[in-house]
Image (cartoon, rainbow, N blue to C red):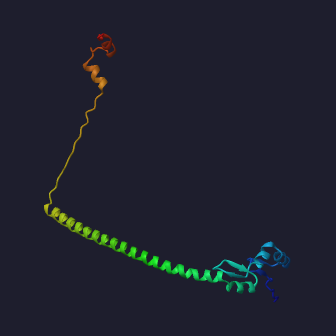
């Protein structure tokens, strides 16, 4: 029995690159993408949007008044936002209670209609009368030209009639 070792893979987790060939790996290490990712800023302050590679610059930044003001400012904003949120919540609760009242009123009307319909159906069941409605429509269509030809054969042509009229001066 011969044992085969799985081929060695080279992985760059930062760039999401994987290969089995060493020369491809070495070429990847020289690429612009890999170098820029590796040289990216390691220390960053999200509150101030400050980025640096040097830890000393980062700790010095943390001691500045700019950083302290930026960190304290969101807490002031949060206090104002909380009072505004409480006001909005109160408004929403008032609107919700009004909507709930309308829904309850609609349900009551629906129940009343159901009761009315049940009484009508029970009354109809007691009457048991059969009503037959038969509607007969007869359309008498005739052609006007045929009528005129049959009944008014001797009639004067309309153009001749107009020519015989005397116009008053």
In this image, 40 relative to 68: left or right? right
Quadrant location, the N terminus: bottom right
Q: Tell me what residue is drawn at x 31 percent, y 70 percent.
A: 103
In this image, 2 relative to 85: left or right? right
Where does residue 62 sit, x and y in percent of width and height? Answer: 67, 85
Query: Which residue, as the protein is rendered here, is positioned at the far right?
Result: 23
- Rendered image quadrant of residue 37: bottom right
- Rendered image quadrant of residue 166: top left
Q: Tell me what residue is drawn at x 86 percent, y 77 percent.
A: 23
155 or 107, nearer to the observer: 107
Where does residue 120 sit, x and y in percent of width and height? Answer: 18, 63
20 or 83, nearer to the observer: 83
Where does residue 152 sit, x and y in percent of width and height? Answer: 26, 18
Q: Tell me what residue is drawn at x 34 percent, y 14 percent.
A: 159
39 or 55, nearer to the observer: 55
- Rendered image quadrant of residue 3: bottom right
Where does residue 141 sit, x and y in percent of width and height? Answer: 28, 32
Quadrant location, the C terminus: top left
Check the image and report above or below for 148 versus 48. above
Check the image and report above or below for 149 versus 87. above
Query: Which residue, as the protein is rendered here, is positioned at the far bottom?
Result: 1
In this image, 4 relative to 133: left or right? right
20 or 45, nearer to the observer: 45
Q: Tell me what residue is drawn at x 21 percent, y 45 percent.
A: 135
Check the image and report above or below for 59 versus 40. below
């Amino acid at each position: 029995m011969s044992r085969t070792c799985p081929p060695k893979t080279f992985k760059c987790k930062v760039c999401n690159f994987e290969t089995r060939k060493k020369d491809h790996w070495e070429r990847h290490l020289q690429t612009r993408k890999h170098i820029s990712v590796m040289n990216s800023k390691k220390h960053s302050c999200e509150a101030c949007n400050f980025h640096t590679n040097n830890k000393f610059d980062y700790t010095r930044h943390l001691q500045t008044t700019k950083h302290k003001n930026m960190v304290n400012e969101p807490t002031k904003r949060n206090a104002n936002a909380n009072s505004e949120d409480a006001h909005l919540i109160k408004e929403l609760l008032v609107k919700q209670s009004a909507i709930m009242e309308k829904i309850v009123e609609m349900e009551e009307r629906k129940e009343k209609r159901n009761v009315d319909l049940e009484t009508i159906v029970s009354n109809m069941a007691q009457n048991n009368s059969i009503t037959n409605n038969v509607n007969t429509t007869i359309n008498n269509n005739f052609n006007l030209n045929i009528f005129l030809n049959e009944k008014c054969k001797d009639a004067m042509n309309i153009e001749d009639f107009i020519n015989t009229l005397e116009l008053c001066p």
